[in-house]
Amino acid sequence: MAKRKPRKPMSKQAQHARRVNHWLNGLILTARSSTGLDTDGDPILKITHRRLFESVGEIARADYQHEILNWQHHWQVTVFVECESPEGDFYSESTEFEARGVRLNDLAELVRPELDTIQSKANPNHYKDHGWQAEILPNRKQEKGIAA
């Protein structure tokens, strides 16, 4: 049996880039008004992953904070308002949009008008909570790899 050709080892930078690109796709950031703001005035984000059911917030903040905050991503954003009727029935108003090539900090400018529109549709007497959820989508290169 013929021996396989040894594989060239990947550089540390290439290993990190591969982990980041694999791990960031499907990352979901959720901000709610009920969770409040941090010391800088930014919303406190709950970080989960589509493939994992538990919260991955501490891993993301420790290992991938720079990539999440400073890189431009493709986002699937859902803006929502949650309401409760006097009878105890819960309902929500929401809208979705896609934002391509946007940093996380710039996403707030896109969410604000949508949130104002949704809040105006909801009954102010039933208002309970509001917020947004953003999922990182694959970029064009990764989409081509998935399709192939």
Image (cartoon, helix red, strand yellow):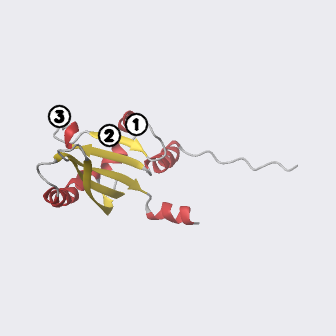
Left or right of 12 on screen, residue 69 = left
Circle nearer the N terminus (1, 3)? 3
- Tag of residue 39: 3
The crowding category of the residue bearing disc 2, from other C-alpha atoms within 10 Å (few below 14, some 14 to 19, many at least 20), is some
- Residue wearing tag 2: 46
Mark 1 vs mark 3: give the one in front: 1
Mark 2 vs mark 3: give the one in front: 2
Where residue 31 sits, quadrant-wise, is top left
Residue contact between numbered discs 2 and 3, judged by CB atoms under 8 Å: no
Q: How many marks?
A: 3
- Element type at marker 1? loop
Which residue is depicted at the point 72% across and 47% down?
6
Left or right of 38 on screen, residue 138 = right
Q: Nearer the viewer, residue 140 or 34?
A: 34
Left or right of 8 on screen, residue 114 = left
- Element type at marker 3? loop
From the top left corner, tell me how far across and down residue 47 is, in percent.
35, 41
The crowding category of the residue bearing disc 3, from other C-alpha atoms within 10 Å (few below 14, some 14 to 19, many at least 20), is few
- Residue wearing tag 1: 55
Tell me which amino acid carries mark 3. Thr
Q: Nearer the viewer, residue 48 or 116?
A: 116
Q: Nearer the viewer, residue 118 or 140?
A: 118
